[in-house]
Image (tube, helix red, strand yellow):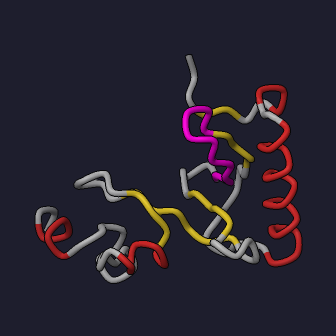
Amino acid sequence: MEIITADFSKFGWVDLKLAIQLLGVYAKKGANFLGQGLTVNLNINSGYVFLSDEDYNVGVLNYKGTAIVQFYSCPECGYENTQEQAEFEEKDFEEFEGFCSRECWNKNK
């Protein structure tokens, strides 16, 4: 069974409302970190609705629902979050080039 889908027939009512909100914000403000091949996706297990490009960059609504922000996944430890939320846990994807911490970054030097 697939976990991620772009098939709107598999989206529930709430998922479709989130997709509409996400696309509305994208239409108004864009997301400069997203490239070509953009799709709206649903993680069936978590219920997260997100944008993804052909390079697997992921965009989600910020906690206010007013902007699309990048969603990161640390290639070393698998920690996932937005930059803003990661900072609450003393992690920093931007400082460590996509890794969540100095420790993960150092393991890949």
Numbered label tally: 0
The correct choice, above or below, for 9 with respect to 16 in the image is: above
| Occupied quadrant, residue 3 | top right
- Seen from the viewer's position, the closer of residues 88 and 100 is 88
Q: Is residue 105 left or right of residue 90?
A: left
Q: Which residues are magenta?
A: 43-52
Which percent across, then down, holds residue 83?
46, 75
Q: Is residue 77 above or below residue 105?
A: above
Relative to 51, residue 9 above or below = above
Image-based side of 49 in relation to 88, left or right:
right
**Which residue is more in the foreground, 14 or 94?**
14
Query: Residue drawn 56% across and 40% down?
Result: 46
Identify which residue is drawn at 73% across, 47% down: 39
Q: Nearer the viewer, residue 80 or 37?
A: 80
* Quarter of the figure that contains the C terminus: bottom left
Residue at left 87%, top 54%?
20
Residue 8 place in picture, x, y as percent = 82, 33
Quarter of the figure that contains the N terminus: top right
Image quadrant assignment for residue 23: bottom right
